[in-house]
Image (cartoon, rainbow, N blue to C red):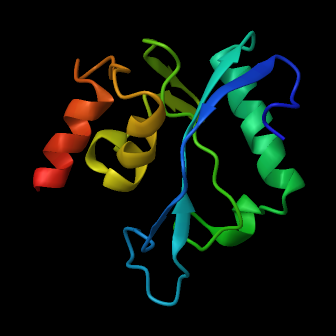
Amino acid sequence: MLGAAPGIAVEAVSSLHETEAVTAEGAAGQPRYLNGAAVVRTSLSAGGLLAALLGIERALGREREREGRWGARTIDLDLLLYGEAVIEEEGLRVPHPGMHERAFVLAPLAEVAPEAVHPLRRETVREMLARVSRG
C-alpha cells in the first residue's frame, strides 16, 4: 500500500522482527509485535507523508481513538526520519522521539539504513543500535 500511494516510492524494506509489546503502562495481555522499517523516496512534505501513513493505517482498520496511546493495534506506521530534517509541528515530531532508545525500532532500520544519521544526536542508526544493544 505504501508503494502504491501517490508520491511515494519504496526503495528498501527490512525483514520483520518479532518482539514483546513495549508500553509505558506495561504490556500485560498484549500480543507480540512485528516490527519493520522501510526507506522511501517521496515528493511529499513530511506532513503529507505522515497523512499518507495514517491513511494506510485507517484503511487497514486502525482506530487510534479507540486504542489509546498504548493499546494493542492492528498496525502502527511511524515517520522516523525525514532526511536530516528536524520538525516540531502539531502532531508531527521528526526525528521520532525515543527512536534512539528502542532496539525494536533501530534493528529493522539498521537493515535498510545503517548509515542514516539522527539529525539531533549526530549518530548513525548503526551506532545507536550498538549503544542500545549494549544496554
Query: What residue lies at 10% left-to-right and 52% top-to-bottom?
Result: 134
Where residue 114 appears, as percent x and y from the top left, is 36, 28
Q: Residue 10: percent from the left, percent from the top?
A: 71, 27
Q: Residue at x 44, y 88 (%)?
A: 28
Q: Quadrant of the C terminus?
A: bottom left
Q: Does residue 71 appear to the left or right of 105 in the view shown? A: right
Residue drawn at point x = 33 percent, y = 23 percent: 118
Looking at this rendering, what residue extends furthest in the left direction? Answer: 134
Q: Is residue 43 above or below residue 19?
A: above
Residue 97 position by quadrant? top left
At 83% across and 42% down in the image, what residue appears?
A: 55
Q: Quadrant of the N terminus?
A: top right
Q: Quadrant of residue 48?
A: top right
Tell which residue pokes out farthest to the bottom in this image: 29
Q: Is residue 3 left or right of residue 33?
A: right
Reply above or below: 127 against 63: above
Position of residue 2 relative to residue 82, above or below, is below
Q: Is residue 103 left or right of residue 55?
A: left
How far across and how far down the image is residue 63, in percent?
78, 63
Disc count in the image? 0
Residue 31, image x, y percentages: 55, 81
Pick the front one: 97 or 32: 32
